[in-house]
Image (tube, rainbow, N blue to C red):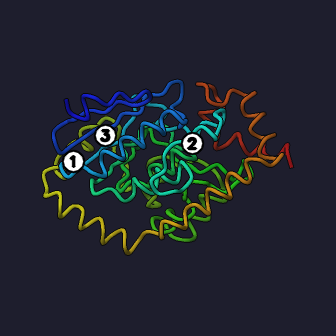
Amino acid sequence: MTFVDDFKPQHFRLTAESDTFWRVTFDNPPVNVIGPEMMKDLKDLLTELEGNDTVNVVVFDSADPDFYLAHYDLAADPAIAEALPSPTGYAAWVDITVRISKLAAVTISAIRGIARGAGSEFVLATDIRFASREKAVLGQMEVGFTALPGGGAAGRLPALVGRGRAFEILLGGGDFDGEQAAEYGYVNRAIRDDQFVEFVDAYATRVSKWDHRVLGEIKDFINKYTRLADDEYPLHSDKFWGAAGLPGFQAISRQLFEAGLQTRSPIEYNLGEDIVEIAARNK
């Protein structure tokens, strides 16, 4: 039995398109939140990929065309995630994003649907981001919760979009559609939705055919010149979880859950806009 045959994740599917091209499809209804169970499975997948010298490309996509990864599961007990093994020694989510960014395999986010908060941080940690022009929505709305993004968005965005646009994204807390995200450099490019799957698969298949060693060497040098030191990212996590325990964060979260957060409700579709009004009530 191979790893792909044995591995039975609960909230995503792993498919071997070939020996060198794997696909991870997020499938955690109702809106693909990132909770402890998904994080456990991601850590197990990363452990396999870190020791795998065959897989050249991993595409991360979603079974839900409306929600790629909505955000972190704010209803979950964070202690459950923090009790999971952490090879880096960092907090649970930072452990995952740092390890993804360092894989020898090329990681591609195929974004159809909403990727906010930790969902946005996940795609920022991957090497390449392709977005559906019509379906992709990205954003870091944590400022509306009175918190800094905890997974490193403030460290990764400036290298992609520049200092001024990083401020615009993080201080505004709003949504960016696929076309605007591509214009800013938040994603590599936006592709028409009716051509999206074909384009991503063709690119991933092409890259999967190259030599594994040279892909790793290219990644090592690009990371050397563009990525923060790993030990910078736990500082972001500490700030986020410090804010999460404060009354303002708790009050905003409570009102969002009362409005239908983490369900297929208008608040999840429009969180980038609606959080402004809710945050204003709690000043």
Gap between marks 3 and 1 measured at Cα = 23 Å
Label 2 vs 1, first from the N-terminus: 1
Q: Is residue 24 above or below residue 147?
A: above
Instruction: Name the residue carrying label 3.
Output: 196
Of circles 2 and 1, the one toward us is 2
Q: Secondary structure at mark 1?
A: loop
Question: Residue 83, which numbered label?
Answer: 2
Q: Is residue 69 above or below residue 215?
A: above
Quadrant in the picture for residue 263:
top right
| Relative depth, front residue between 182 and 203 | 203
Instruction: Name the residue carrying label 1.
Output: 55
Of circles 3 and 1, the one toward us is 1
**Number of numbered discs visible in the structure rendering:** 3
The quarter of the rendered structure image containing the N terminus is top left
Q: Measuring from the top left, give residue 148's x and y in whole percent.
A: 66, 57
Q: Amino acid at mark 1?
A: Val
Q: Amino acid at mark 2?
A: Ala
Q: Measuring from the top left, give residue 14's x and y in whole percent.
A: 31, 33
In screen coordinates, is 256 left or right of 115?
Answer: right
Q: Amino acid at mark 3?
A: Phe
Question: Residue 254, which numbered label?
Answer: none
What residue lies at 28% left-to-right and 54% top-to-bottom? 106
In screen coordinates, is 145 left or right of 79?
Answer: right
Q: Measuring from the top left, give residue 217's x and y in whole percent.
A: 23, 67
Gap between marks 2 and 1 measured at Cα = 29 Å
Gap between marks 3 and 2 measured at Cα = 38 Å
| Relative depth, front residue between 41 and 157 | 41
